[in-house]
Amino acid sequence: MKVDGIILAAGLSSRMVDNKLLLAFRESFIIRHIVMVLLESNLDRLVIVTGRDEDKVKHTLEGLPVEFVHNKDYKTGQSSSVSLGVKHLKDSQAIMFFMGDQPLIKAEIINDMIGSFLISDKSILVPYYHEKRGNPVIFQSKWFDKLMDLSGDYGGRYIIKAHPEELEKYIIKEKHFFLDVDTKENYAFLQALEKSSD
């Protein structure tokens, strides 16, 4: 079974004001760094669902072997981006969903998650740090119809909550793996982490 990836990069960045995907990170930009990490992983195809600042995001990723889908209705919430991405990859066997603002993911952890999913008898893999659930999440193709029918800003969390018997839990050991850059405070914390690791 092959696992494809979708990066949800269509958000409003309403709490940040500036587009968080285009913030500087490790001599690049957050979205380009995430894509470069995922291109090093065992994902088969990688699709970027764009929304706000579509042209700028695509320019930032110019030259990389990724596919783009534009969500003209991105203001309606995350579910519309999930639906579009799944429709684009409707022939996939499984899809791993990533946030466009989670820059501390690592290819080796992604690969281990994919490996755990492939040997599991469960149809959804969800990562946890202690009791906190996060992203990325993998859904087998049996869930694609339900994912395409979602509405609002909830992504696939309703499916996860409604079907605990289908979940393979993956334990994350890295404290900041789930860090996302939703606010200026998050970004300042990320910068401080990077400085402390120099």
Image (tube, rainbow, N blue to C red):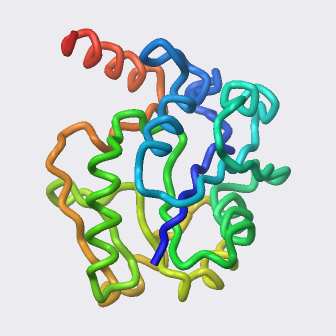
Q: Quick check: 132 left or right of 90?
A: left
Q: Image quadrant of residue 192?
A: top left
Q: Position of residue 142 (x, y in %)?
A: 54, 88
Q: Quadrant of the N terminus?
A: bottom left
**140 on left or right of 80:** left
Residue at image position (29%, 89%) is 121
Q: Is residue 186 left or right of residue 115?
A: right
Query: Is 131 or 21 nearer to us in this picture?
Result: 21
* Image quadrant containing the C terminus: top left
Count the marks.
Answer: 0
Task: Please state which of residues 182 and 111 is positioned toward the viewer in this rendering.
Answer: 111
Residue drawn at x 30%, y 62% as measured from the top left: 113
Foreground: 133 or 31?
31
Using the image, determine if residue 186 lies above or below residue 125: above
> In the image, what residue occupies the spot 68% across and 44% down?
10
Q: Position of residue 135 (x, y in %)?
A: 39, 55
Residue 190 position by quadrant: top left
Q: Is residue 88 left or right of residue 34?
A: right
Q: In which quarter of the view is residue 174 placed? A: top left
Can you give x and y, in whole percent of width and height, for residue 104 in the image? 34, 35
